[in-house]
Amino acid sequence: MKAKPPSKPKTHLHLHQEEPQNPSEFSFAIAKIAVSQICQLVGYKATQLSAFNALTVVATKYLEAIAKSASSLANTSNRTQSNLLDLTLALHHLVTLHTSNLFSISSSEGGIIRDLADFVSFNDEIPFAKPIPRLQITSIPP
C-alpha cells in the first residue's frame, strides 16, 4: 500500500505574528484578525494561509472601494466627512455596479440597510481577543 503524499499544512485561524512596522502592515494585520473572525463566524475551522491572505486582500479592497465612494459622495455635497447616507449610497452603487440587468434596481433599493440591520441583529459581535494597540507613528526627518 502506497503512503499518502503529504498535504499542505492548514493554518488554524489563530494568528501569531510579529509586530507590524508601518501603517500599511498594521492595517493589514487588523484586517486579518477581522477576516479570521468572520470566517469563524460562518463556520470555518482552518484554512490555507494563501487563501486566507487572498480573502483578506479582497476584503480590504472592497472596504477601500466603499470608503472612496463614500468620500467622493461627501465631496460632491461639499462636505469633508462622510456620513451614513454617503455610506449607504456607496454600498448601493457597488451593489448595482456588480448586478446584472436581470434584477431591477427598484427592488434592491432599501435592501442594503435592511440586510445590514438583519446581519447586526442576527449575529453576535465577536470582539477582538486583545485591545488593538495604537500604531506609534514616528516623524520622518526632512
Image: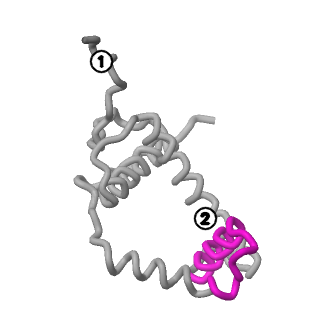
**What range of the chain is rendered magenta?**
84-108
Numbered disc 2: secondary structure: helix
Image mark for residue 107: none
Q: As displayed, is residue 20 above or below residue 74?
A: above
Label 1, residues with CA under 10 Å away: few <14, some 14-19, many ≥20:
few
Q: Position of residue 81 (x, y in %)?
A: 61, 74
The quadrant holding residue 97 is bottom right
Q: In the rendered view, does 56 fall on the left or right side of 133?
A: right
Which amino acid type corresponds to the residue marked 2 in the rendered image?
A: Ala
User: Which residue is located at x 26 percent, y 42 percent?
Assistant: 14
Provide the residue designation for mark 2: 67
Q: Position of residue 114 (x, y in %)?
A: 49, 84
Q: Nearer the viewer, residue 17 or 59?
A: 59
Provide the residue designation for mark 1: 4
Res. 15 visible in picture:
yes
Q: Position of residue 116 (x, y in %)?
A: 46, 77
Reply yes or no: does residue 122 show up in magenta. Answer: no
